[in-house]
């Protein structure tokens, strides 16, 4: 399982990356794509939508199952990766390049509480 | 969990294993979609050893099966021929579906689904007359080699079975060299199903892989059978529906006065629903079992749904009001949306060609 050190992770198997412009890119982890199997449908939130932390805001569906993607922090959607709609399998090929959407975090939104790569990996070694 | 004789071979081939009907079975070997395409375009091999062959033997074997099955084994005029049938309860409900092979005078072989095999045997035991015996063949392994190039790869791998199986017509079978070869399957493609002693299964499997048959798991098996419009017992049908209500009316033999379990109930009531295929007509999700369907004649439900790798669109089998017909527009509740789909008569795909 691939878990880049530069990213942060949620308990619901999203990854987050804060970029230089202050926005946060969000995708699903290698573990998530592996568990779901080959992805055939992706739905992403509209640009401009305001999300609350924990809100279900995107859907990824594989040949066998559908899974929700949750907003990790409060914020506004500033971009979405529309190319994925025609090529959901990119999420299987390279889940850390295939970001789903980008959020501009609300003032005061805290990214410090998320897992780093070691903490994210640890839950699988205990399982 | 139960393991087939090929369990080690699956692990060696990189299978992702899942529990299915009490068995530890391969879901896929890396890519379910590629396995699906291999069967539509070339050849794949499935371990179906979780299914159970039961031999039915004795002077009363024909009378027994004529009373127990909704299809009529009397249609099997010569040894080797097979037919597909439902096993019904007294109310006409579908307990299971099966293939019955006429192997020799007074001798048949029935292949049962893994999840229902024990209940089927208990049911058949109750119906069994003194002059017929049931012999579960748990010591046999079963492989399905399917695809447009399945037969040539089968013969390349197992040349000792070539002469025996070369002339088999569709739904024909033959016994040779302690093996049983049938030109049947669950994918909508040409190919063979092979029953053989468990101790020889791993060698046959390796030879099939070496001949170029791609190992395929239950994931591809499910999307292939869905495209082929084939019901999955326990999912697309169960004791709550009759064969007429799940698209299997063609398998019920009502000619003559043959008295079989469920016949009186079938004759007494008209179908309350019907099975049709659905093709999703817009983006927005994937059709799945249990999603509600709004049809012109009323409400229905999807019984099997997935993404069709051949059609590159989502398809489903649905239980719809009896008044529904192919070519209608319906709405399916997919998560929080209502998506448009059209009704079609299955199959969706046969022999590599899209039919809807």
Image (cartoon, coloured by chain):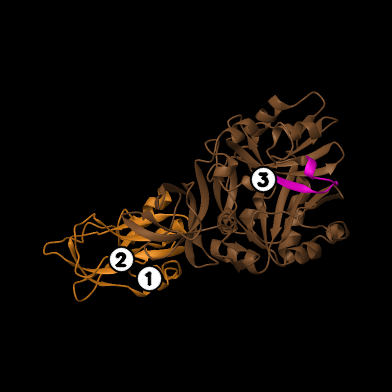
Of B340 and B265, nearer the camera is B265
CA gap, disc 2 to disc 1? Answer: 9 Å
Which-is-in-front pick, marks 3 and 2? 3
Disc 3 + disc 1, Cβ < 8 Å: no
Q: Which residue is mark 3?
A: B251
Q: Locate residue A98, reporting x and y percent.
A: 37, 71
Residue B2 is drawn in which quadrant? top right
Answer yes or no: are tags 2 and 1 on the same subunit. yes
Looking at the rendering, the stretch of residues picked out in magenta corresponds to B74-84
Answer yes or no: are tags 3 and 2 on the same subunit. no
Single out the residue that lies furthest toward the left.
Answer: A107
Tell me the crowding category of disc 3: few under 14, some 14 to 19, or many 20 or more residues within 10 angstroms, Cα based: some
Tell me the crowding category of disc 1: few under 14, some 14 to 19, or many 20 or more residues within 10 angstroms, Cα based: some
Chain in orange, by letter, is A
Question: Chain B's colour?
Answer: brown
Say what secondary structure mark 2 lies in. loop
Q: Which residue is mark 1?
A: A85
User: In what quadrant of the picture does the N terminus of chain B appear?
Assistant: top right
Say what secondary structure mark 3 lies in. helix
Disc 2 + disc 1, Cβ < 8 Å: yes
Q: Is residue B276 magenta?
A: no
Q: Locate residue B115, reporting x and y percent.
A: 59, 39
The answer to whether any part of residue B290 appears in the image is no
Residue at horizontal 69 percent and vertical 30 percent from the top: B124
Give residue A44's mark: 2
């Amino acid at each position: 399982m691939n878990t880049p050190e530069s990213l942060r992770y949620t308990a619901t198997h999203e990854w987050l990356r804060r970029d230089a412009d202050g926005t946060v890119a969000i995708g699903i982890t290698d573990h998530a794509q592996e568990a779901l199997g080959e992805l055939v449908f992706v739905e992403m939130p509209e640009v401009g939508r305001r999300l609350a932390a924990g809100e279900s805001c995107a859907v990824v569906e594989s040949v066998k199952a559908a899974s929700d993607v949750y907003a990790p922090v409060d914020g506004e959607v500033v971009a979405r990766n529309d190319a994925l709609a025609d090529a959901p399998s990119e999420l299987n090929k390279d889940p850390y390049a295939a970001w789903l959407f980008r959020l501009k975090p609300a003032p005061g939104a805290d990214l410090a509480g998320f897992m780093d790569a070691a903490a994210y990996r640890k839950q699988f070694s205990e399982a | 969990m139960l393991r087939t004789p090929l369990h080690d071979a699956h692990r060696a081939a990189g299978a992702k294993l899942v529990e299915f009907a009490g068995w530890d079975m391969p879901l896929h070997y890396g890519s379910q979609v590629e396995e699906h395409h291999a069967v539509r375009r070339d050849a794949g091999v499935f371990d179906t050893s979780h299914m159970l062959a039961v031999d039915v033997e004795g002077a009363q074997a024909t009378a027994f099966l004529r009373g127990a099955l909704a299809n009529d084994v009397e249609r099997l005029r010569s040894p080797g021929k097979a037919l597909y049938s439902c096993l019904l309860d007294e109310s006409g409900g579908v307990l299971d579906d099966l293939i019955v092979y006429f192997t020799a005078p007074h001798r048949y072989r029935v292949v049962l689904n893994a999840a229902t095999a024990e209940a089927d045997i208990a049911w058949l035991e109750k119906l069994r007359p003194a002059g017929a015996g049931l012999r579960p063949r748990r010591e046999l392994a079963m492989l399905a080699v399917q695809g447009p190039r399945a037969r040539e790869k089968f013969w390349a791998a197992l040349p000792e079975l070539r002469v025996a199986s070369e002339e088999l017509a569709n739904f024909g079978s033959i016994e040779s060299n302690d093996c049983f070869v049938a030109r049947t399957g669950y994918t909508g493609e040409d190919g063979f199903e092979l029953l053989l002693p468990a101790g020889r299964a791993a060698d046959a499997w390796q030879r099939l892989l070496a001949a170029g048959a791609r190992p395929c798991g239950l994931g591809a098996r499910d999307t292939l059978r869905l495209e082929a419009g084939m019901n999955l017992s326990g999912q697309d049908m169960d004791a709550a529906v009759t064969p007429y209500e799940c698209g299997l009316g063609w398998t019920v033999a009502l000619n003559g006065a043959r008295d079989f379990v469920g016949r009186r109930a079938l004759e007494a009531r008209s179908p309350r629903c019907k099975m049709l295929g659905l093709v999703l007509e817009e983006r927005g999700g994937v059709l799945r079992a249990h999603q509600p369907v709004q049809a012109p004649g009323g409400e229905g439900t999807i019984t099997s749904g997935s993404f069709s790798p051949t059609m590159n669109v989502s398809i489903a089998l649905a239980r719809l009001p009896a008044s529904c017909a192919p070519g209608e527009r319906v709405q399916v509740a997919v998560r929080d949306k209502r998506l448009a789909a059209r009704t079609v008569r299955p199959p969706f795909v046969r022999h590599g060609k899209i039919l809807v």
